Each structure stands twice: as C-alpha cells, then as structure tokens.
Amino acid sequence: MADAAPLPPTNGDMSGAVGAWNWDIASRLLVADARFASLYGLDPAAAAAGLPASAFFEPVLEQDRLRLRIAVAGALRGAEVFARDYRVLLDGEVRWVSARGRTYFDETDTPTRFAGRLTDVTEQKRLEERLRIAQTAGGVGSFEYLSGYGTADVSDEFCRLLGLHTAKSLPVRTINSVVHPDDPPIIQGRDGSGALGTAFHEFRIHRADTGEERWLASRGEYRPADRGGVSFIGVIYDITASKRSEAALRLLTETLEERVEARTQERDRIWNLSGDLLNIIEPDGTQRAVNPAWKRVLGHDEAELVGRSMECLIHADDLPLARTRLEALARGEPVAAFDTRLRAKDGSHRWINWTGMSDGETIYGIGRDVTQRKLLEEQLRHSQKMEAVGQLTGGLAHDFNNMLTGVMGGIDMARMLLAQGRLEDVDRLLEASMQSGQRAAALTHRLLAFSRRQALDNQPLDVGTLIGSMQDLLRRTLGEQVELHIDTPFELWTTLADESQLESAILNLAINARDAMPDGGRLTIAARNASLSEADLAGSDQAQPGEFVEILVTDTGLGMPPEVLAKAFDPFYTTKPVGQGTGLGLSMIYGFVQQSRGHVAIESQEGRGTKIRLYLPRHDGGSEGEATPEMPTAITGSGEIVLVVEDDPAVLRLMLDALRELGYRTIETASGKEAVPILQSRRHLDLLISDVGLPGLNGRQIAEIARQIRPDMPVLLMTAYTRDAGDEAGFLAPGIEVMQKPFSIDQLGRRVTRILRSPHGNSSAGVG
C-alpha cells in the first residue's frame, strides 16, 4: 500500500543536480534532459534529440563500467527496478552519480523502455568517506539497530574493535556473543520495550580473532523509529587504557592517606604517565591534586589548578549537571559516565567524560578526553538531518510547483481571453485554476497532518456507524474486482476523533489497497474494542496505555518487501508511477492518529497482503456533546456587522469584498491593538472574525478579550497553521469556532450564516 518517489520532471532546469533519461529499447535511442547532459558532459541539444544507447556508458570510469553494464542488462531483461552508484570522469574530475530507474512493459509484458533519473551524490560520498576516516582514526565504531530485527547496521571500525570480519550488517547474536557473560550485551532492549533516551554502559569482550580481553564502552540513544518500534543508534570505543588507569588509581587510593612519601615508584609512574585526567578533590569541588595529563590535555599547570574550584573551568551550560554529580559524590554515591566541557588554556573547550568515586571526605575523579567522539556524533546527526530535510523539501517543491503552475497558468490564460473578449472558455480555465489551488490546499493539510499541526475537530464518534455510512462510497471507489467486507460489532466503544479526518484516512487506505490488488481481491474493514499496554505502545509518542477502538484494514494484495515496509510512513515515498501518488497518504494517516493520541501498526509480507491497524482512544464521556448544526443552504446576510482582524492586506481585502458581496457590513483592522478599542466601544457588532497567527496579540488572545467584553458575541478564528490551534476541542469555548485556510467564499458564507443562526450567535449591541 505504500508508494515510491516519482521521477522529477524533465523541464531543462539546470539549477538542480538531478537529471532524467528515457532509453527506447527497440531503437536503442537514448533521450535525456539538460541536467543529465550536464552530469555526463554531453551537448544538451544532442541529448534532447537522441543519442546512441552506448552514450550511457562512455563517460563512466573504467573500473565501474562493467558492473554498470551488467546491472543495465539485467534491467533490460525484465528485472524492472534498477539502482546503481558509479563514477563518471568529467573534465578531468571524478564525480559520483546515483542512478535509479526501471523498465516499462507493454500489454504483452515486452520491455519497451528503460527510464529513470541521475543524481550527483559526490558530496554525500565525500562526507561518508570523511566520516569513515574519522571513525577509524578516532577508534570509534558506530551501529544502528531497530527493535524486532535480528541484525544491526555497523561500521568497519565497529567490526575491528570486536575482532569480527568487516560487514555492512551483522547478526545481533554474533555481536553480543563476544561480550563477557557477566556483563550486559552491546545491543539491549531488542523487543523495543526499554525506556527511551540516552544510554551508556561498559563491558568486557573477548576479541573474536585473538581472544584478548578488552574493555569497551557503548553510548547511544533509544528513540521511536519513524516506521514503528524503537531505534537504537550509538557508538562503541575502547576504554581498556582508562580502565587500567582506574584500577591503578584504585590501588593508589588505598594508601593515599599515607601521603606522597609512601607512594611507590610504580604508582608515581601511573599517576604521571596516564593519558586521562586524574584529580583528588574536596566535597566543595576544590582540587587537592591533579596529574600531569591536565597540562598535556588542557594546557594548565598544576599550580594554576590546585586549591581552586573545578567550577572555574566548567562551561556555564554544564555547571548544573556537574554540581548535581558532585553532590552525589559528596553523599558517597558512585558516579559514572557524564560529560562536561572544560576550558583549556587557549580559551577553547574540550569534552571530558568523567567517572568519580568517593572515600570519606575525599573524591577521586578520572576524566577522558572525548572531544573527537563528540564531533563525530554531531557530524552523524547533521548528515541524517540533512538527508531527511532534503527528501521532504524535494518532494514538497516538486508537487507544489506543479500545482502553482496550474493556478498561475489558468489565471494568465483567463486574463488573456478576457482581454480578447473571448468569454466562452473563461469559466473552464478558472475552474481548472481553482482545482489546482484546492489540490495545493489538500497538500498543506496532509503536511500538517504528518507533522501533527493540523486543526482537529475532535468529537465523540461511533466508528461502526461511520464505517457503515461509507460502504457505498467505498464500493464505488474499489470497483467490481475488489470484494468489500465490513465487520463492525454493535458493542463498539465510542471514540474521540475528527470525523472528516477519519473518513479520509479510511478512504486513503482503501485506495491504497485497491492499487495493491490490480487483479482483484478482498478488502476487509473491521473494528473492535482493544486494550493496549506500554509494551504495545513502544512506537507511539502520544498514546497512553488504556482502552482503544481498533480499526483493522486488511487486503489480499501484493504486500510490501521489508525495504518498502520500512519507509511506508515516510513523506513523499511512493511506489506508484509519476502522477498517481504524492506519497503523503500513509504519512498523513500516521500524523492524524498520533495527534489524536492514538497508535498505528502495520504488517505486510510480499505476496501475502497488508494489515494496517488504527487505534483511537476510547471516549468515556459518552455522546454528551451538542450536535453540530447542519450547514445552511442560504449563505447571504442581512446587514449584520462583522469585525475582521487580518494582518495580510491581500487576504483582508478578499475577506471584506466577500463578506460585503454576501450581504454583511464590515469593520476592518490589521492587528489586535486596533481591534481591542473597537471591542471596548459601544459599536454594534454581530460577529468577530480573526486570524490566529497575528503579531502582538494573536487571534486566541483577541477572542478571549472579546468574550470577556461581549460574552454573547460569537467568534470565528481563521488559521493557516499554528501550534496553538492543533486541536479545536482542546481550547475552544462555546461560541468560538475555527476555520482552516484556505477556504472558498461559499464555505465562508455558509460558516458565517450557521454561526449567526446558532444558539451562541446572539448579536451584541455594545458594551454595558
């Protein structure tokens, strides 16, 4: 049911690093856009006119050419999906190119063309190489594990530290088998039930190649994965030297009260030669002694540190943590593995990982310089963040620009026809522009749903009744080849959700199921009462354990392979052909359910269909809410006075013109500062309409002021996006409603008419 990202349009735009090609298999003619030609060093005109298919391989570096030919040959013979990274030589410079495409077939299953896109990934490859070098040089190995799977993705340095053969991924069983049986495994919480957040532990290993015992440390973070479950991303590094220093220091402290005279030459050597920072401090943080490593790592002489508090070196942002740990040590509690930044002699800061222990009134500290590891972790986070941002912005720009082209082009054509006096096609062009605008509005609503920032109108809802009312629509949507089966028992609990959003979610799932069953099949939509525990909700960041209404949508379609299932909820990810899917359907459903404090689960196997479960929280209050009044058929006013607060001049002018055309009188203001005096005056007002996202006083604050001054006057808030208006039921008092931008004049007229006719729509003649 998930989709794959569509190919970019071949419009000749040279500003991007993505190019497209089309290879006619029968004629062996290769047609490519200007961006492809730029990446390959070809003449754009010749590429657009058509080149021999051999041009696809000519600039490719010799070492990669044979592998590329084999991959293309496989695609042309019917493998369909094609994906290959290779190097091209362009003007003496080697560039990395990522090619993604597929083979297309005619109705007789004969391959007809081979098409796809190229992306310049040189910078990404260079970053990966720098990260690999940094990992190897710093002795830090990285890994990533997703709960429920038997393997983990690992770096080369990770394998080296464990004495294992280099591999891109390793079985978790193999990784943990080298750990000492008395120590915790490297990868814990494999069922995803552990607590989220950062994690650190130390352990011993017996290297798989030599059997040597080494001490390693693991630092990582448990966090919810985008596709459900828990992701554990972390690093390991060797701390054998630190452990030996710690053991030696422990021996040293056993006789430290005998003063320096009683120290042996060997202990002096450990104190003096240790690469870790060693110190002896008082409970108030005053340093009694420091070893020479302070000079080597930070540049400070012993005389500059002894007798002074450690706080003079600690970064201001890390002081609260350091004080908390010092207080614990003063109480006799051991403290391990916390990081602080210390100021060096040259004014820079170094990251130090501390372990502390206390003995009576004396505290002993061991600090290891982990600045290199911190820099590597930051590089890794930045790389992952930029990859996610690039995927989101690329898909958004592609779809939005197409829709804006429809709006602007239709308006330009209508303007030209009006100038020529040709009125017969103007309505058609304006209708096409309106449809493009509505598609753009739907896209923003889906984006807000994915990010959980849409405005929800949550009401007590009978899921069984809702699904039953959709049967006719679903049957028409699915067609004759798909059998629809509905299973909703009478004893279903009431849930709390936005009815229109839930309808949209069920319809989206049905459409995805239909597309996954091209030869027909069976779609089952069932509902039941369910109770979920904390373990069941490990992949949710909003739902709380308790009672839910489960909606189960099951198809007998093609199913998804693991790599597609892992990306099913990613925005703009689609396996459908260009123009047949935005890739926002499942991500919108995921965001809507999470925002409704529910939970989503998906199961799929290639060739065996897909199951998607939506869990919405049970509503214990029954259906005591007031029924929503029906939308009026008449949308004209009778001279009622409407105060409009909107800071965008174009939107304000449109609102005023629309309301006046609908028969209302208007008072315009651009800010809360202008609106408040009018509300405080004795002027007659029937309705307040305000944008939510205003500078200074926002729309919600204006509404609260208005209800205090004129308690009977209704308020209509407008929002394009705001964090504070994410859930209407969460903050709206009776007589206050919210309307999502953009909206049509007809929608505005019907909403205003309904509000003024509702029980809360009594006119307010003035103040007092």
Image (cartoon, helix red, strand yellow):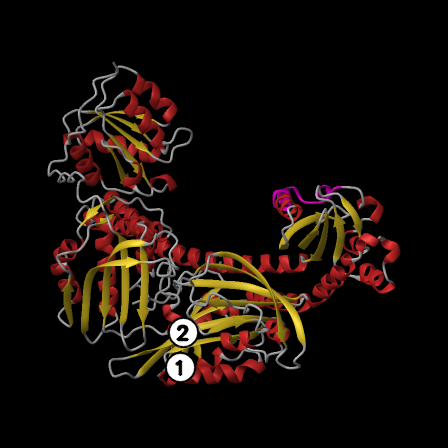
The residue closer to the viewer here, 569 or 330, is: 330
Where are the magenta residues, as a range? 309-322
Task: Answer above or below: position of 186 versus 432.
Answer: below
- Circle 1 sits in a helix, a strand or a loop, which is it? helix
Q: Residue at x 19, y 74 (%)?
A: 521
Measured as percent of width and height from the top left, residue 524 is found at 19, 67
User: Could you say which disc has been placed on residue 537 in the image?
Assistant: none
Residue nearest the observer in this picture, 114 or 570:
570
- Percent x, y for residue 612? 28, 64
- Quarter of the figure that contains the N terminus: bottom left
Q: Circle 1 sits on which residue?
A: 75
Crowding at label 1, few (<14), some or many (≥20) Cα neighbours within 10 Å? many
Q: Earlier in the sequence, mark 1 or mark 2?
A: 1
Q: Which amino acid type is shown beneath numbered disc 1?
A: Ala
Judging depth in this view, the residue of 45 and 675 nearest the camera is 675
Q: Residue at x 30, y 47 (%)?
A: 412
Residue 520 to residue 274: above or below: below
As drawn, 52 above or below 616 = below
Which residue corresponds to mark 2?
A: 101
Q: Is residue 510 visible?
A: yes
Placement of the C terminus among the 4 image quadrants: top left
Inspect the magenta stretch and tell me whether residue 725 lies in it: no
How many marks on residues? 2
Front residue of this view, candidates 711 and 274: 274
Main structural element of the magenta stretch: helix, strand or loop?
helix
Asked if residue 315 is among those painted magenta in the image, a careful observer would answer yes
The image position of residue 405, as x and y in percent, is 34, 53
Instruction: Tell me whether circle 1 and circle 2 mark residues in contact (CB < 8 Å).
Output: yes
Q: At x 14% / y 60%, what residue is drawn?
A: 489
